[in-house]
Image: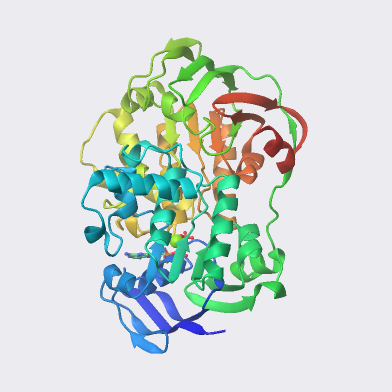
Amino acid sequence: MEKVLELKNIVKRYGQVPVLKGVDFDLYAGEVHAIVGQNGAGKSTLMKILAGVITDYEGTEVLKGKPVRFRSAGEAQVHGIGMVHQELSVILKLSVAENLFIGTPGSKKTFVNWWEMENKARQLLKDFGLERINVKRPLGSYLLGIQQMIEIIRTIHSGAKIIIMDEPTSALSPPEVKRLFELIGRLKQAGTSIIFISHFLDDVLDIADRITVLRDGRKITTLENKDINKAELIRLMLGSSEGISENTEIELSASEKEPVLEIKDLSCRRLFRDVAFSVGKGEVVGLFGYMGAGHMELPRVLFGLEVPEKGRVILQGKEVKIKSPGHARSLGLAYAPESRKKALCLTKPIYANITLPFLATIGRFVNNRTRELEISRQLIERTALRPPKPLLNVGNLSGGNQQKVSVSRWLPTHPIVFILSEPTRGMDVGAKEEIINLVRDLKAQGMGIIVASSEPETIFALADRILVFSKGKIVHEFKQGKVNKELLFQYA
Ligand SMILES: Nc1ncnc2c1ncn2[C@@H]1O[C@H](COP(=O)(O)OP(=O)(O)OP(=O)(O)O)[C@@H](O)[C@H]1O
Ligand SMILES: [Mg+2]
């Protein structure tokens, strides 16, 4: 097979700290080459170098036999390299159509009129089975999964011959993942090369031709997919002999608990209807569903981000009308949404992000940095955040480490009910355990917890009870006995 790309001895430092320590990587025409590794291993950094986003590094890049050195992402695009970013590069204020065509080479010339652009956008979305999307609406009004699809479609449509996908499936539901994989198959046929980064090792083993393992800024190995299994892959990633078992089944035995939160006949636009359930003290209720099923939208209502048109919310026996996120916080609700980008201030230091909900609840914005740093250091230690530097901007953390900040910063506020959407999104197996243990601690302290997720593993690891959402309604409740993936998918 023809080698289209080679990266040789890539070194990247931040200040004195090396995060890539001499990495080699190569890519054939028409192959899917996966990169796996723990949070902070250097996967995104390596790919940002390839895509021209990071320009100060050492080492060489050879594209189709010729050495290249990109000075910008635009230059990489001109050379046929496109990237679907882990933190998405879509612009939420712009419409879906604008997001699809702006920033792709040649877009300025192609579209002079809006009508034509919107029609083209509709056609493109139809090809991807997304005809229900209104191309005129701002992309920010859609959930993360849709935003992710739009970024993928845009990159593919740009005509790139090398497409980097950094965690492309983390917000997609199984049918969408399937559609994406079919598409990747077609791209391969056409000779396009795909670099696929993911923490979903089943997906990686499903789709990759070759797999490169990074650990702590070094390349450990590159293997043919057929020569490896999941357990070995995990061992190579972690660098230890012990593996971590994933939950593919659980045994539930939920008992009646004193309710802290009761939801009665709640409906919100077309997002969900007649939803009713309660959350007990020290109980974790799992909300499972495919993207758009309503389970991810419900938390937004509970946190005052959407206004329900019908129904009641009762917190510790008292009916509440939640007007805004600030109001929700003051009532004792906490919410870690599925989108880190929306939740965090990426240009602010870690400590300021950590203390934001805390300062907001105590209603004081006093400048007590010593105290803020102290709170931050405790949380950083408790969650094993890397690097443990409270003054670093959150935007400089790896995706998984950002997620740790987004979840753990609610702890000092001692909420009554904690709502988490996709709490382990983008996390490696080790970091997942850390978050899972954290949630279990909170549960032991008597907090009521709602976990909304489209990943069965996350639900299985945490939930005492599982509510399955489908098309905006609760269609099934699991509270006793064995549950596995097949059962969940049957109802969803
Ligand atoms: N601007 C920066 N300043 C300092 N350190 C940085 C900066 N950007 C990234 N890093 C560090 O570089 C290391 C590699 O980060 P990278 O984002 O490449 O990890 P990753 O393998 O993509 O992880 P994840 O799976 O969590 O996305 C991390 O330790 C991260 O904190
Ligand atoms: Mg990353």
Q: Measured along the vertical axis of the image, is residue 367 above or below residue 99?
A: above
**Ligand 2 picture quarter:** bottom left
Image quarter for residue 186? bottom right
Q: Picture coordinates of residue 329 (x, y %)?
A: 37, 27
Image quadrant holding the C terminus, namely: top right
Q: Picture coordinates of residue 141 (x, y %)?
A: 35, 36
Q: Picture coordinates of residue 77 (x, y %)?
A: 33, 70
Q: Picture coordinates of residue 11 (x, y %)?
A: 39, 80
Residue pictured at 38% horizontal, 19% vertical? 322
Residue pictured at 49% horizontal, 36% vertical? 420
* Camera sees residue 309: yes
Residue pictured at 68% horizontal, 57% vertical? 244
16 and 167: which is toward the camera: 167
Image quadrant holding the N terminus, namely: bottom right
436 and 67: which is toward the camera: 67
Q: Measured along the vertical axis of the image, is residue 246 above or below residue 155?
A: above
368 left or right, relative to 300: left
320 and 274: which is toward the camera: 274
